[in-house]
Amino acid sequence: MTGIICGTGSYAPSYVMDNNEIAAMVDTSDEWIKERTGVATRHIIKGETTVSMACEAARRALLDSGVRAEEVELIIVSTISSNVILPCTACEVQRELGAENATCFDMSAACSGFVLAYNTALAYLSGGIYRTVLIIGSESLSNLTNWKDRSTCILFGDGAGAAVMKAGEGRAYLPVTCSDGGKGKALTCLSRHTPVESAHMNDPEYYMQMDGQAVFKFAVKKVPEAVNEVLRKNHVSKEEITWYVLHQANSRIVESVAKRLEEPIEKFPMNLQEYGNTSSASIAILLDEMKRDGRLKNGQKIVIAGFGAGLTWGASVMEWG
Ligand code: UT7
């Protein structure tokens, strides 16, 4: 028994902020941002919330899968930008969707969040505990962004992605998951909820702060290691993998991972040009785009890999459809 993704959905706010708009706020340029990160635009909330985006992505995933909200037995939302501390985002999504039979909880693992939500759902499905699970990554990172800090505000965007998973016959691949709390200071944010309390509005520690170079070096070393390990563990060869769907943080990270794995860059789809880094939503949004434009086909083997604050990282293999 395993868990199979049978529907995907995503949502991005309609407001699109380009690099020139950021260059009007901080000392940067469209050229610098594109060259160092690959990002050209990002979607930014104007009235949407982490819950509303999660709900829209989830509704689209349910429609795509043909599963009714009442059939969902578990909802996992991965987010670092919930609207409130209590209740959790997953319970708010349950209420809005009318998924009255679901058990709901949030996960906080930043940019590794979708991979860990997938693994958690897989464990519940493979173990026979649930048959239908909804996993969502939803982020309003613009609320946590210091719009005066050019080293971080260029990177992030808002959005949500969701997948419906069902129990089914097939192989349950083993994941690779890792954490290194000792290096947690590389990427921090003291704010617990949004909007940031006015008392802390001018305190940079209450927004995301990052040692960009440290995170970059960590990612380009640890992600290829995790991918190689997950393939080795599952006796899957690189030739069998059609797609490596990586967390969308920086095109140079994706390119470097491809090079270290000695795999063609064509196997590494990217949409960070449009969305920027949407943390736990990024992999889910990309999977949904690939499903909708026909790149994902039944039987393809795919690796998903996340990395980010914590530090956390990991990779999983899945068979599509
Ligand atoms: O989601 C997971 C977590 N996040 C990541 O994966 C991000 C990982 N890190 C990165 O993507 C990159 O480190 C950044 C894009 C954040 C920065 O790129 P970099 O090539 O590592 O730049 P840097 O920090 O080494 O800075 C190089 C120069 C510095 O100037 P000096 O000291 O050489 O004069 C910075 O002050 O670029 C300057 N700089 C900028 N210049 C124009 C930093 N940010 C900017 C900017 N515009 N926005």
Image (cartoon, rainbow, N blue to C red):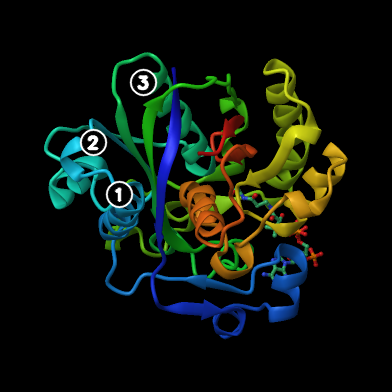
Q: Would you say 71 lies left or right of 271 here?
A: left
Q: Which residue is mark 3?
A: 124
Mark 2 lies on residue: 72
Determine the residue positioned at 63% across, 54% down: 249
Going by the numbered disc 3, the residue's amino acid type is Tyr
Residue drawn 75% across and 65% down? Answer: 36
In the rendered view, tell whether residue 83 sits above or below residue 219: below
Residue 62 has which mark?
A: 1
Of discs 3 and 1, which sits in the foreground? 1
Determine if the C-beta at disc 2 is less than 8 A from ligand 1: no
Secondary structure category for the residue under label 1: helix
Label 3 within 8 A of ligand 1 by Cβ: no
x and y, in percent, of residue 114 in the image: 47, 40
Write down the quadrant of residue 306 in the picture: top right
Visible residue check, residue 140: no
Taking the image as shown, residue 82 lies to the left or right of residue 215, namely left
Measure the alpha-carbon separation of dots 1 and 2.
Answer: 9 Å
Q: Relative to 201, is 24 on the left or the right? A: right
Within 10 angstroms of label 2, few (less than 14), some, or many (20 or more) residues?
many
- Which badge, 3 or 2, comes first in the chain's sequence? 2
Helix, strand or loop at disc 3? Answer: helix
Residue 74 in picture, x, y percent from top left: 26, 31
Query: CB at mark 1 closer than 8 A to ligand 1?
Result: no
Residue 105 makes an appearance in the image: yes
Please state which amino acid type lies under the numbered disc 2.
Val
* Residue 93 placement, left or right of 277: left
- Residue neighbourhood size for the residue with mark 1, other residues' Cα within 10 Å, grouped as few (<14), some (14–19), many (≥20): many
Q: Mark 3 and mark 1: span between their CA atoms?
A: 19 Å
Label 1 close to label 2 by CB (< 8 Å): yes
Which label was assigned to residue 109? none
